[in-house]
């Protein structure tokens, strides 16, 4: 059963039961009020006729306990239909048009009366019963008040209410149908939107036209759709990156392996002069060293993905004093001047990983044919920034966004000659993420490159 049908049926049942219950309660309340009023009048009439009966018995000089009184002589004095019963519950006199059950007469007393509402096909009476005692005479007086008009009025009211009830139910069906449609319409929009997204239209959005629960549902649906679209885009990007990684990896293996196999086959098949053998061996050595570099860096990438590193608080100056001893000889051999100035500060690092970052960045600067490398560090608030800048060839602006991709090389021919594998900056980016730091790369492709590493200082981020 659809939600529309459930809402429609619930509205109809709830409306029908509520209106019926309200009508019945109102009619019953009105009836009880009228009955109470009629009972008061019936008691007043009983008391009046009781007084008439007592007066008649008192004035009758023949009145004795064993004297049979002819109540027919007193009937003309009663103001309403009445009946008189003896203490043995035998009927002495009655002009009531409705039956009376004398079984309850024992419950009456001098100051206590009972009520009965008796009906026939055409008439309805409220009967009031009470004991009448005069000297040695005791009898039960029953008076009846005609309430046929009241009962007929109630029946007419019930009949009229039923007609109104069915009329309102019939008129209410279209209104309930319209309200149910309005409630379900917005939900149907969300359902159709979800169906379109399931069909692959991830850019689908719903119009938020209200601030009620349905509007909140539409807004949350749009937020969900945005997250789904972003996640799918991210998954697609990751899948593409994996495909590119596999393709680049195969390509990077194919080139050196082809060279190694070709030169090895040439050495195996032919007797070559010593200088040609030496050149072939040099090519095999260079390609082998590039394959070694590629395998080592790939291993580093995979290990860092699966390993948990423990960071240690260290002084920045002490770190770079130790690094300087290994960087200066490399720079000196390549004719590069190293300039280093580090301000005091403490950061949390894994020393070996951090060392590999700095060495990779310095190596990239040297490969870019720079003459000077400046390494500076300064603290600003809770951030410690390490800046490495060179005056080499730089990186084209349009390629800055791809520099950290695996196997990506700005100058492929130069990188291969220098045993590059295009994994250095990918490793740097991975290590920076492990440290919870940020890296910013700036270059115009002409006047060198500037790389800024931002670390949280120990103690600052804990406050």
Image: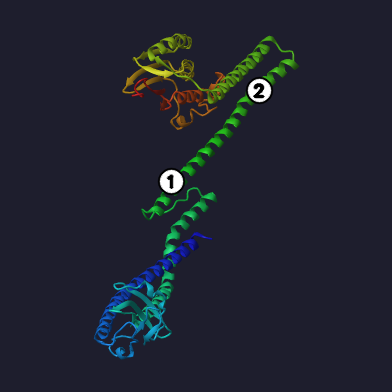
Query: 152 above or below 206?
Result: below
Look at the numbered discs 2 and 1 and tell me whether their residues touch, using CB distance below 8 Å.
no
Where, quadrant-wise, is the N terminus in this rendering?
A: bottom right
x and y, in percent, of residue 425 in the image: 49, 24
Q: Secondary structure at mark 2?
A: helix
Outermost residue on the right side: it is 269
For image coordinates 45% across by 45% down, the residue present is 226
Where, quadrant-wise, is the C terminus in this rendering?
A: top left
Q: Is residue 352 left or right of residue 216?
A: right
Name the front one of labels 2 and 1: 1
Front one among 255 and 18: 18
Residue 193 circle label: none
Residue 291 image-quadrant placement: top right
Can the viewer see residue 128 in this picture? yes
Front one among 219 and 363: 219
Q: Which residue is mark 1?
A: 223
Q: Tag 1: Cα neighbours inside 10 Å, few (<14), some, or many (≥20)? A: few
Front one among 225 and 148: 148
Instruction: Work out how far the residue at label 2 is from the one at label 1, CA to CA, in angstroms.
Output: 50 Å
For image coordinates 66% across by 22% down, the residue present is 257
Instruction: Tell me which colouring the rendered structure shows.
Output: rainbow
Q: Which residue is mark 2?
A: 257
Front one among 262 and 244: 244
Residue 263 image-quadrant placement: top right
Q: Secondary structure at mark 1?
A: helix
Query: 253 above or below 46?
Result: above
x and y, in percent, of residue 324 in the image: 43, 10
């Amino acid at each position: 059963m659809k939600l529309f049908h459930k809402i429609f049926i619930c509205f109809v049942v709830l409306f029908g039961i509520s209106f019926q219950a309200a009508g019945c309660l109102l009619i019953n309340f009105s009836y009880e009020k009228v009955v109470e009023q009629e009972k008061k009048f019936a008691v007043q009439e009983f008391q009046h006729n009781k007084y008439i009966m007592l007066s008649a018995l008192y004035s009758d000089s023949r009145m004795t306990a064993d004297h049979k009184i002819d109540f027919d002589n007193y009937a003309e004095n009663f103001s309403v239909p009445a009946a008189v019963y003896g203490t043995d519950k035998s009927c002495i006199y009655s002009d009531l048009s409705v039956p009376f059950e004398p079984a309850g007469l024992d419950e009456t007393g001098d100051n206590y009366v009972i009520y009965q509402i008796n009906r026939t096909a055409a008439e309805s009476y409220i009967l009031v019963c009470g004991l009448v005692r005069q000297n040695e005479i005791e009898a039960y007086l029953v008076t009846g008040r005609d309430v046929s008009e009241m009962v007929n009025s109630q029946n007419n009211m019930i009949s009229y209410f039923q007609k109104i009830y069915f009329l309102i139910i019939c008129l209410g069906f279209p209104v309930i149908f319209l309200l149910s449609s309005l409630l379900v319409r917005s939900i149907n929009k969300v359902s159709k939107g979800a169906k379109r997204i399931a069909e692959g239209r991830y850019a689908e959005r719903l119009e938020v036209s209200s601030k009620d629960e349905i509007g909140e549902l539409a807004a949350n649906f749009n937020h969900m759709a945005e997250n789904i679209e972003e996640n799918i885009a991210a998954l697609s990007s990751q899948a593409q990156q994996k495909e590119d990684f596999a393709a680049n990896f195969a390509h990077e293996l194919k080139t050196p392996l082809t060279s190694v196999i070709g030169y090895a086959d040439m050495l195996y098949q032919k007797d070559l002069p010593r200088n040609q053998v030496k050149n072939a061996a040099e090519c095999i050595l260079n390609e082998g060293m590039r394959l070694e570099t590629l395998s080592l860096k790939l291993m580093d990438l995979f290990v860092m993905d699966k390993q948990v590193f423990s960071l240690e608080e260290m002084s920045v100056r002490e770190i770079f004093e130790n690094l300087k001893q290994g960087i200066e000889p490399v720079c000196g051999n390549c004719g590069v001047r190293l300039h280093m100035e580090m301000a005091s500060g403490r950061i949390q690092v894994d020393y070996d990983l951090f060392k590999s970052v700095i060495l990779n960045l310095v190596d990239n600067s040297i490969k870019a044919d720079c003459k000077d490398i400046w390494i500076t560090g300064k603290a600003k608030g809770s951030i410690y920034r390490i800046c490495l800048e060179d005056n080499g060839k730089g990186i084209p602006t349009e390629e800055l966004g791809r520099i950290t991709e695996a196997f990506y090389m700005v100058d492929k021919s130069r990188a291969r000659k220098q045993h590059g594998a295009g994994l250095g900056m990918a490793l740097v980016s991975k290590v920076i993420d492990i440290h919870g730091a940020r890296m910013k790369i700036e270059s115009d492709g002409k006047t060198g490159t500037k790389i800024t590493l931002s670390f949280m200082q120990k103690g600052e981020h804990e406050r």
